């Protein structure tokens, strides 16, 4: 059964054509991975089918009574509401029909026998719905899902207004999973989850009986949960059966076949054009020349997809730092209340350290405290001499109305246009991206613009807060290679073990110092 049908979808954004004549059907129970390079239109595509964006053209038709669940990171969580209240909100529709059942019971004493029979039948139907949807074990379901995503570590009675961005996203994800919609729409759900909770989500999705559409650049995660791939490239959506590895194999085979056919056709075109040019002027051979010209005119020309620019990352290295990078003395991090026990940690020249641990324990706060952006609750940080710091922030709030060129120009005012365009192109951005406003770019493209600033400034220590969030596969691999080649020190926050294990020489787990677990 088809739960979603899309016909002839066209969409442009920021002056760029993103999707062209896209048609497909989504069937009940399909587990779909939506993939493509940064900026190909994955999030736009999802926003269109969920009704958040209007397409330029095309039809989107949902089957009747289909419940769609979308992980909206901008959804409102009201102040004064506990995490438990927010999660119980997933069952609002069940509480509503239970109230309806109670109202029917109240009516029973005031109606005729025929009406009573009809009410009894309706009550029986409602009762079946409630039992089928686990209404009578709602609280245990809430606690089970909260435990799986680590929300019980925070405390289910905690006010949602006091949560970090990552914790808030976890609450929204948990609520969505509890709703058990007919189709789940998930856009990079692992970005705000730590390792153990990614494992739990993986298991949940493997067992999920309904359909889901998942955007993710985490290949290991994709491989383990999807049975279909929708690949967005050059404004088209192509369907592949199997997981990401199956897609890669078929995609490469098709690409090779197309390239071989293109070469053969180009050779044939060259021969035909040569014959026409040599023989069209001679009376004796004019007819043969015209016949070949007709063949040329009717030929369906094979076009190869434009090669996407592959990023090339190389960090500019400054002068050698002193032996000490930083030292913390009884440092207690936090805002209104402490997030950690006293920290006595030292980083020295040449160390590459990964900071890991659950969301909300203060990993970002720790880095910002070292940089002096946040005043600690207690203790102090001593920074070494001759430090040249490159800092990659996890998320930049607010809309950036500058173009990419203006953004880099502000950072490097002495550069000319050619230097700016060249630096952005090396980060894997096309001319269209480079000339666009930063705010219309995808999350991955915006991350590349921010990386461009750090790459081109001399540094001897890098502080990177989840730099792989939103990056596509090629960019992630290139960043890993560049960090391995970098001679300076690295302090890296990451939730992707396959990324940080290849970069870091040691790991600091901040869970052992937190006051929140």
Image (cartoon, rainbow, N blue to C red):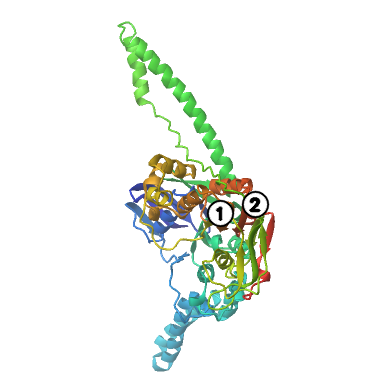
The answer to whether mark 2 and mark 1 are in CB contact below 8 A is: no
Q: Quadrant of residue 290?
A: top left
Would you call the spot at circle 1 few (<14 residues within 10 Å), some (14-19), or many (20 or more)?
some
Furthest-bottom residue in this view = 109
Work out whether residue 259 or residue 367 is closer to the camera in this orientation and state it: 367
Q: Position of residue 204 (x, y in %)?
A: 60, 64
Task: Establish if 354 lies above or below 74.
Answer: above
Q: Position of residue 123 (x, y in %)?
A: 47, 82
Task: Establish if 156 lies above or below 451.
Answer: below
Would you call the spot at circle 2 few (<14 residues within 10 Å), some (14-19), or many (20 or more)?
many
Q: Secondary structure at mark 1?
A: loop
Q: Position of residue 293 (x, y in %)?
A: 34, 19
Identify residue for label 2. Answer: 503
Kindly tell me whether residue 138 is visible in this rendering. yes
Task: Establish if 170 lies above or below 417.
Answer: below
Work out whether residue 129 or residue 313 is closer to the camera in this orientation and state it: 313
Work out whether residue 5 or residue 143 is closer to the camera in this orientation and state it: 143
Task: Establish if 511 lies above or below 434.
Answer: below
Which quadrant of the rendered structure holds the C terminus? bottom right
Mark before the other along the chain sequence, 2 or 1? 1
Identify residue for label 1. Answer: 388
| Mark 2–mark 1 distance (CA, rounded to whole Å) | 20 Å
């Amino acid at each position: 059964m088809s739960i979603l049908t899309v016909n002839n979808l066209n969409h442009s954004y920021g002056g760029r054509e993103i999707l062209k004549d896209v048609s497909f059907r989504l069937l009940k129970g399909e587990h779909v991975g939506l993939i493509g390079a940064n900026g190909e239109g994955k999030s736009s595509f999802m926003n269109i089918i969920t009704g958040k964006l209007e397409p330029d053209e095309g039809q989107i038709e949902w089957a009747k009574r289909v419940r769609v669940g979308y992980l909206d990171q901008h959804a409102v969580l009201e102040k004064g509401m506990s995490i438990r209240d927010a999660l119980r909100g997933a069952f609002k529709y069940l509480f509503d029909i239970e109230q309806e059942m109670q109202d029917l019971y109240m009516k029973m004493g005031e109606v005729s026998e025929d009406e009573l029979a009809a009410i009894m039948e309706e009550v029986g139907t409602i009762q079946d719905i409630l039992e089928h949807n686990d209404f009578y074990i709602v609280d245990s379901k809430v606690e089970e899902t909260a435990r799986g995503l680590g929300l019980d570590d925070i405390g289910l009675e905690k006010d949602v207004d006091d949560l970090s961005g990552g914790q808030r996203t976890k609450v929204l994800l948990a609520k969505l999973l509890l709703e058990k919609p007919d189709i789940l729409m998930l856009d990079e759900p692992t970005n705000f989850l730590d390792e153990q909770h990614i494992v739990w989500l993986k298991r949940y999705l493997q067992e999920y009986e309904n359909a889901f559409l998942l955007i993710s650049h985490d290949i290991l995660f994709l491989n383990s949960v999807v049975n279909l791939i929708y690949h967005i490239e050059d404004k088209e959506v192509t369907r592949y059966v199997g997981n990401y590895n199956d897609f890669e194999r078929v995609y490469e085979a098709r690409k090779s076949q197309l390239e071989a056919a293109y070469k053969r056709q180009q050779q044939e075109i060259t021969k035909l054009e040569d014959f026409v040019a040599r023989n069209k002027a001679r009376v004796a051979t004019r007819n043969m020349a015209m016949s070949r010209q007709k063949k040329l005119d009717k030929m369906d020309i094979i076009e190869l997809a434009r090669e996407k620019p592959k990023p090339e990352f190389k960090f500019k290295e400054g002068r050698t730092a002193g032996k000490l990078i930083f030292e913390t003395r009884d440092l207690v991090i936090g805002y209104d209340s402490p997030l950690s026990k006293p920290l006595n940690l030292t980083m020295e020249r040449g160390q590459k350290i990964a900071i890991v641990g659950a969301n909300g324990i203060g990993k970002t706060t720790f880095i910002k405290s070292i940089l002096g952006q946040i005043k600690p609750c207690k203790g102090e940080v001593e920074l070494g001499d001759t430090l040249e710091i490159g800092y990659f922030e996890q998320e930049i709030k607010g809309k950036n109305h500058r173009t990419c060129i203006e953004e880099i120009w502000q950072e490097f005012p002495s550069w000319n246009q050619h230097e700016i365009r060249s630096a952005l192109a090396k980060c894997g951005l096309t001319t269209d991206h480079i000339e666009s406003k930063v705010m219309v770019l995808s999350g991955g493209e915006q991350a590349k613009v921010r990386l461009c600033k750090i790459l081109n400034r001399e540094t001897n220590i890098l502080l990177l807060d989840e730099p792989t969030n939103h990056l596509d596969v090629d960019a992630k691999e290139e960043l890993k290679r560049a960090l391995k080649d970098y001679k300076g020190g690295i302090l890296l926050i990451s939730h992707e073990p396959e990324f940080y294990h290849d970069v870091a020489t040691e790991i600091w787990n901040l869970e052992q110092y937190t006051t929140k677990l």
